Amino acid sequence: MSTDALSRIRPAAVAGMFYPDDPQQLKSEISQYLNRASSSSSSVPKAIIVPHAGYIFSAPVAANAYHLLTPEIQKIKQVILLGPSHHLAFDGIATPDADYFATPLGKIKINHSLCLKAQSLDFVQTNNPAHQREHSLEVQLPFLQVILNDFELTPLVVGNCDMESISQLLELLWGGAETLIVISTDLSHFHNYQVANRLDRKTSQAIEQLQPDLISSENACGKAPLNGLLTLARKKQLTIDCLDLRNSADTAGSMDRVVGYGAYAVH
């Protein structure tokens, strides 16, 4: 039996729901989102913050962050991806034991050595159920597959975990130019358009000013990984730029109950 046949693969859980399950349609849509992106920067970001809703709602926003990676697609070989748990309550941070994560665009190899390195911290453990249905990581994968030529993935689902611990984990995995950090989070949820705009502007300002103490789970569902990054960014004296700030009513939804989305670059 071949080694490939023995590989453990985490199949796509939300293809056909959050994004197209047809490979050609998926690649075409992502290319269109990237072509429409208006963001610009003098340098490629070390980390990006992107939303994780259905593509019709949040992909136009996320594309403004992913678009900035294109000048360095040959250099980026490792992606550290963190997102909040939506389906399972647990303490700490979850790594998978899968060898690959699959999407309609193919398989992405998991970097087991970096997963083991993460597990040197006692709050990081293998937890497959946390990954099984989680969309906050999965919706980022097709974007990464379209943009990057060849990379390995370290996927981390964040449960109940303080920002200092997450900052410690990110610093451990920080790497050099070969490593990209991706934080997956939406902003406010289910307010009307006017209230959401006000709340999201305040959250966006806190992100740009590296003020994690001002961001709660009501402001961002990915508060934990987001605030962990902000804590480390402040320590490293990095800067964060807002590339796009919209909500679901701006892209494809009603104005009565909206979800906020922001795209940010960390330099």
Image: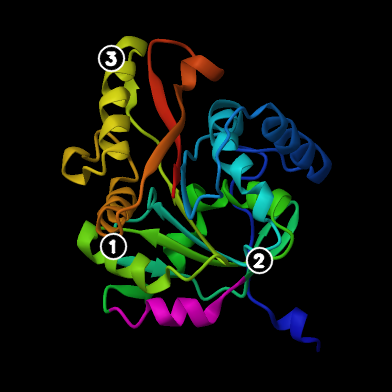
Q: Mark 1 points at which residue?
A: 167
Answer with the quarter of the image where residue 232 lies: bottom left
Tell me the element at label 1. Answer: helix
Tell me the element at label 2. Answer: loop
Q: Using a 10 Å C-alpha cutoff, classify the residue at mark 3 as few (fewer than 14 neighbours), some (14 to 19) or many (20 or more).
A: few
Q: Using a 10 Å C-alpha cutoff, classify the residue at mark 2 as few (fewer than 14 neighbours), some (14 to 19) or many (20 or more).
A: many
In this rendered view, identify the residue nearer to me: 126 or 42.
42
Give the Cα distance between marks 3 and 2.
Answer: 40 Å
Most extreme residue toward the bottom is 1
In this rendered view, identify the residue nearer to me: 139 or 174.
174
In primary-sequence order, the first of circles 1 and 2 is 2
Give the Cα distance between marks 1 and 3.
Answer: 31 Å
In the rendered view, would you say 248 is above or below 261? above
Whether residue 233 is visible to the viewer of this picture, yes or no, is: yes
Most extreme residue toward the right is 24
Q: Split into 4 quadrants, where in the image is the N terminus?
A: bottom right
Q: Residue 161, image x and y in percent?
A: 24, 60
Q: Mark 3 points at which residue?
A: 195
Q: Name the residue under label 2.
A: 151
Residues drawn in magenta: 110-121
Give the amino acid type for the residue marked by disc 2 in the picture. Answer: Phe
Q: Which of marks 1 and 3 is in front?
A: 1
Q: Residue 150 carries which label?
A: none
Q: Residue 218, image x and y in percent?
A: 24, 34
In primary-sequence order, the first of circles 3 and 2 is 2
